[in-house]
Image (cartoon, rainbow, N blue to C red):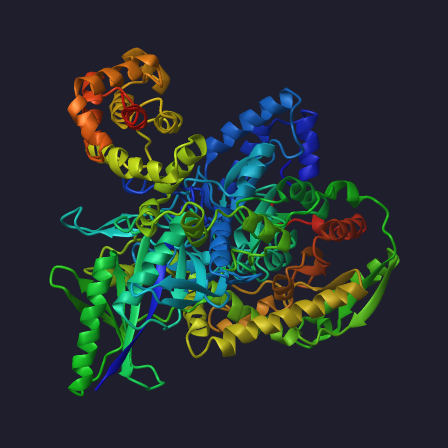
Amino acid sequence: MTWETVIGLEVHAQLSTQSKLFSTAPTKYGALPNTQTNYVDAGLPGVLPVLNQHAVEMAIQFGFAIHATINNNSYFERKNYFYPDLPKGYQISQFQRPIVGNGYLDILLSDGTEKTIHIDRAHLEEDAGKSLHEAHSHHTGIDLNRAGTPLLEIVTTPCMHSAEEVVCYLKTLHRLVRFLGICDGNMQEGSFRCDVNLSLRKMGQKQLGTRTELKNINSFRFIEKAIVFEQLRHQDLLESGQPIIQETRLYNPDKNRTESMRTKENENDYRYFPDPDLLPIHIDSQELTRIKNAMPPLPTEISKRLQQKDLLPQESIEFLFTSPSVLNFFNEVRQKSIAPAKVIINWLKGAYTAALNEKGLSFETPLIPVDQFALLLTRLTDGTISNNIAKTLFNQLLISSKTVDELIEQEGLLENKNDAALVELIQSIIHQFPQQAAEYRAGKEKLLGFFVGHVMKETKGKANPTEVNALLVQLLSVSN
Amino acid sequence: MNKQSVSELSQALKNKSISAVELTNDFLKRIDLHRDLNVMISVNEENALLAAKQADKRIQQGQANPLTGIPMAHKDIFCTTTMRTTCGSKMLSEFTAPYAATIVEKLDKEGVVLLGKTNMDEFAMGSTNESSFFGPVKNPWDPTRVPGGSSGGSAAAVAASLSAFTTGSDTGGSIRQPAAFCGISGLKPTYGLLSRYGMVAFASSLDTAGLFARSAEDIALILQATAGFDEKDSTSAKVEPVHYSEALSKPLQPFRIGLPRSTFHPDVDSEIQNAVLEAVRLFEQLGGEIVELDLSFQSHWIPCYYVVACAEASSNLSRYDGIRYGHRSQNAETLRDLIVHSREEGFGMEVKRRILTGTHVLSAGYYDDYYVQAQKVRRLIRDELTHALSQVDFLLGPTTPTCAFKINEKIVNSTQHYLADIFTVGANLAGLPALSIPGGFNTQGLPIGIQLLSNHFNEARILQLAHHYQQNTAWHKMTPNGEEK
């Protein structure tokens, strides 16, 4: 029998606001327990939530990016359940009226086909704290640093059918939220987490099968493995006539299998109701226009531009999309330098990345002021310096606070641009090797390299190779 | 001295016929003398005297505000940093907040002298003050009777002159009903006029901070200092400031008063009916036109109120789990036990009853029939009241159907007990301002309260009308018998 897998996803993207969704406490990750927490986050008696407008704006930007409906007068509800790291005994979330509804995201699969993923809703909610079971031997610690951190929960319809589609959608979504600047996308820190709802049905059947939910998987690789495992598990059960139990499961990466966490019977009745401490979110059309105008270009727009205007190959574009800081750095250099896009990318991919790796840094922490890096590539492009010298200068810029021009002057690296000395040198070399010069003129063009090598040797590599080439071609062709 | 009004005391402090320290000592002595009334949960003499000294300094320097140096007390539902905030519960009996409620901060800035925190029904649930973990408060007019609730301590404190004025909270009548039982004035302002920040939540969409004093004139003075938008409370209103005290003595413009026919329902004490009729006559003399009307949804007020209030309470009180603060059970092996036992031990009967009711009405399968239905009914109630108030300027009626009942009388039958709020909950459901003022005494010498309602943010007019009434009556000047001055 052939089975069709049906998958819907819930992604929790942590919004990169400075403060929490309903309090003024900072959202910094990795701080000492309970140092990023205030009375509101701790759910003390009598405190009240106040909505962070930035989080609302980010959610709306996301809505625009996926061509969704922005719900005017969406509101917050309370999801009631007891848990030690849920300080109020309820989570403030959105249920009946999410801020973003009914959008879509197009993804490009590896075989080149495009697929539209329907996004049913995206709603704002606060995160819970963390229980620290390992920190103490006789009791559990509670860290409320994460409590109240704003999340955007992005829910698709059950419209995916394979692990490949899921991972492709997740990567596209991940890129989108990062390049919108609304989520740092750090999966290790839990800024981008995914729950998978999966079921199988007979091919051609309309009704969905019983689903299981895989919770909180934090890497694309694990998501792929978990789905493959779960597909087979469902298939085995179905084919041997056993029932699928509707339940929440966790993926165990060490054993590469999913394990039951809780069944439906043990789920809470969350008793959702509108939070009376908060007013509905009302956004007028002027406000919507302002938010829309403040949006950065979408990854698809950037990609199109790079492809069509800069004629960059897909590989280079992918490199620029590694992270927003790479693209930003590229754009800045691009703006400040006459160097062609390809040259900039080659430098960023090569020398620059190598230097970053050596220091264990990322593009977020520039190694060299962007002005100087741009100037370096300008000097290279206008022929003031050769590639070799540019590399030497780059290494010097890493350790020196001097400018490119200061270093060029200091090291005497300025090239003998078109000057008589270079012409003279080339002529004397041609005279030194009459045999080879004659062979060249007779058509053995490979010998050009022989002459270039000699010129470079005499100039200790300081001459501009392009210029040397041009002069050699010109001077060799003159028979004497 | 301590039987004078806030405005008289303010005058006396200003012209230095008494110092704030002397006045504070007077009040502290009276509090001590009347411990048997069980009005206060906490008293902080040291801090009170310190505040009094600072107030005297401010008065000396000519930088005093009208409330500088006035001894007062907060209902123990408002968070204070100098005293614990128990909310009348074992759950919070050891809890001291690291922050002060906005209303507490505002009054501190005015330079009031905080004497202590007043007793109340547990988590403001009740109308007799008998659900307090700290024991019932006794009515100063008759110590065998209740002072009303939930702000029973605050009302009794003013009636017994243990505090010049007090704060309270009103979710279904918790200010107006005890004000009526204790023969003083009590204002439940428009929802959103006073910040709820730092006021322990019972039912957030109904909870209103409010005030007790002898007269409307005093309340106007205190409202001036406490009203206004607070960025820490998203439900507080951005409204233009109003000068309540200035509005008081302006001559009354012609006005219409609506008198609901429910006032004359046989379940309402005839002596209370007569007091309302007497008030009607006075208002007519003051230039009012009386219009009898029907509020057809009035019979739905109480059921609607209990669904909404209990639903919100069940969620608001979830934070008391014994994990971060509050009562923590010493007798728990598992996490589940810890939460269950802490709540079992920390909450009293009435609180548990309402949490259960609220949990039920929000449960899957019941939500639509109870909670959603109640929201619809609430809208109808609100619409009916605001419509009535578009035809008349005020609504007048009794605050309560009976005078103060005996301690232990109503504990037995809680549904009966809930009917104590029959005239008051409408204002909460509709978010309207309502004031209870003394309107006479019954033959047993117990105070009778009459209630005035008006449209949203119409506090200035209610207080003005009540002030004119009080210029022509002396009910609000009466104090309980058998006490030496």
Q: Is residue B71 visible?
A: yes
Looking at the image, is B403 positioned above or below residue A296?
below
Name the one closer to the observer, A322 or B106. A322
When asked about the image quadrant of residue A218, the answer is: bottom left
Residue B247 placement, left or right of A8: right
> Picture coordinates of residue B431 (x, y %)?
63, 60
Q: Is residue B38 visible?
A: no
Q: Give the residue drawn at x 47%, y 51%.
A: A58
Name the one closer to the observer, B8 or A205. A205
Name the one closer to the observer, A34 or B73. A34
Residue that protrudes farthest toward the left in the picture: A255
Q: Give the residue drawn at x 58%, y 61%.
A: A72
Residue A420 placement, left or right of B49: left
When asked about the image quadrant of residue A268, the answer is: bottom left
Q: Give the residue drawn at x 56%, y 33%.
A: B24
Name the one closer to the observer, A119 or A165. A165
> Picture coordinates of residue A28 (x, y %)?
34, 41
Looking at the image, is B286 positioned above or below residue B197?
below
Please state, as top left, top right, bottom left or bottom right, where the N terminus of chain A lies in the image: bottom left
Looking at the image, is B424 positioned above or below residue A450?
below
> Picture coordinates of residue A115 (x, y %)?
38, 68
> Picture coordinates of residue A191 (x, y %)?
33, 51
Please state, as top left, top right, bottom left or bottom right, where the C terminus of chain A lies in the image: top left
Residue A447 placement, left or right of A308: left
Q: Give the residue drawn at x 20%, y 33%.
A: A358
Residue that protrudes farthest toward the front in the picture: A480
